[in-house]
Amino acid sequence: MKSQNRTGLDEEGRRRLDEMVQNRVDALAADAKTQNARAPVPPSPDGVMDFQNLAGYRELKLQRSMAAIVGLDNPYFRLHETAAGATTIIGGRQFINYSSYDYLGLNHHPEVREAAHAAVDAFGTSASASRLVAGERPGHRALEGALAQHYGQEDCVVFVSGHATNVSTIGAILGPKDLVVHESLAHNSILAGATLSRAERRSFPHRDFIALDLLLTSIRRRFERVLIVVEGLYSMDGDVPDLPMLVEIKRRHNAWLMVDDAHGLGVLGPKGYGLFDHSGTDPRDVDIWMGTLSKTLAGCGGFIAGPTALVEYLKCMSGGFVYSVGLSPPLAAAASAALAIVHREPGRVDRLRRVSRLFFDAAKTRGWNTGTSAGFAIIPIMAGNSVFAVALSQGLFERGINVQPIIHPAVPERAARLRFFLTSEHRAEQIDETIQAIEEAMKEVAANPSMQSIPGFPQGGPA
């Protein structure tokens, strides 16, 4: 009698099985070799694999060449030698700084720094892995609880990146049968999240909520879930949406409403609590509150506050959370301390509002185009041309003012601008000095003969 093994096959059967498997492996290998021989890799067009031939890189080089012709420096990636705030040091020289999101000056606050130091001492600098793998630290839960309470929501989850928060959340909660509707000026992270979700995407004109209502009336029935996404304070333009109207629209069309309050927290409303504070709206009327930790909260990362079911789902299904390291403990501690100060020291919001209004009114008095800004911390001065915007930025830099130009393709060419971020720590005399410097730089740039040859250069100054 032939011996039997644990699989029930005798030795002869095992031999035949091994032979069959080996024959199949050999056949597959031979087939793959034949296929490879039949389909050689096609040659690439000359230079197509050279990174320097990427379309965006060619445009970047063209912009820099044009700037060099008229003697303009690169205004980006300058090395700052001190903490971000109302002033900065570049190349050993102090500048009045309008390129910081530190709206309430909390990046310098001793309690925020002490909280971060204590977290480093207790937990180190890293969470070391995803929170599903490495577990959580007390700071994670404390921050999420405080943010959920701030926005009147059941729960909250924090991510390591503000950009990834939008991408991962929108990408996780929607699918091909759904619809994302956003404003025409939506942040890149919102667009990327919509693309990841594979949902259909539609936009409506900036702050035109009648158009939004008409759009949903026309197409809502074609989709299962609908998400409306807006920003609480638009970072390029400094204006705000009509939250009560949005709440009414989302209810009428059975949609979710998501508000990206990244720049609203610490700026909008009598207490600086954000868009709901500014609008006098119950924050629970919004389905999803998104925000970042890198502006008023003096850290880095993002968060989603909403129903418990949403938060639990994101913690298990959102790639930006599941497959990313947990938020660094000192960043969580710093953000918690900063949020507590926002609640405790409303005077910072008052100071921010006063200096913002001082700057805004001075610009309006001189006839400068501030776009649609409402005058809350973010105030653009429209240049109407990218070269003019860069030249004006350089003229201000030479006068001790640091402000970045926003140029094409970040905005349409005709909408190129300087974007001023005000903080509660700017002083009235700094605003006066800046306004005077802008006047001088505008005249200087407009009178520069080398600028007149630039196509589209606005004659006589900014648009």
Image (cartoon, rainbow, N blue to C red):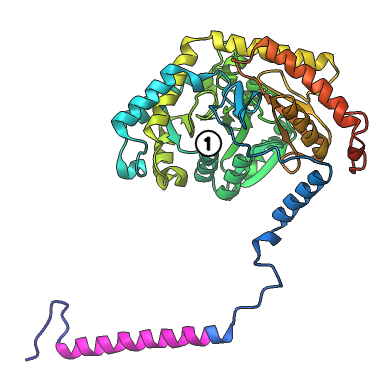
Q: Between residues 248 and 284, which one lies in front from this camera angle?
A: 284
Residue 173 pos. (x, y %): 50, 42
The amino acid pointed to by label 1 is Gly
Q: Is residue 218 visible?
A: no
Left or right position of 314 against 201: left
Give the quadrant of residue 460: top right
On screen, 64 above or below 436?
Answer: below
Q: Between residues 170 and 390, which one lies in front from this camera angle?
A: 390
Check the picture and name the quadrant holding the C terminus. top right
Q: Between residues 439 and 235, which one lies in front from this camera angle?
A: 439
Left or right position of 161 against 437: left
Q: Residue furthest left?
A: 1
Disc 1 is placed on an element classified as helix
Range covered by the magenta-colored residues: 11-35
Residue drawn at 60 percent across, 27 percent down: 89
Which residue is the site of mark 1?
162
Q: Residues within 10 Å of mark 1 (few under 14, many from 20)?
A: many
Residue 160 pos. (x, y %): 46, 38
Residue drawn at 54 percent across, 18 percent down: 105
Q: Is residue 437 visible?
A: yes
Residue 75 pos. (x, y %): 70, 37
Left or right position of 439 against 58: right
Give the quadrant of residue 226: top right
Residue 321 pos. (x, y %): 43, 42
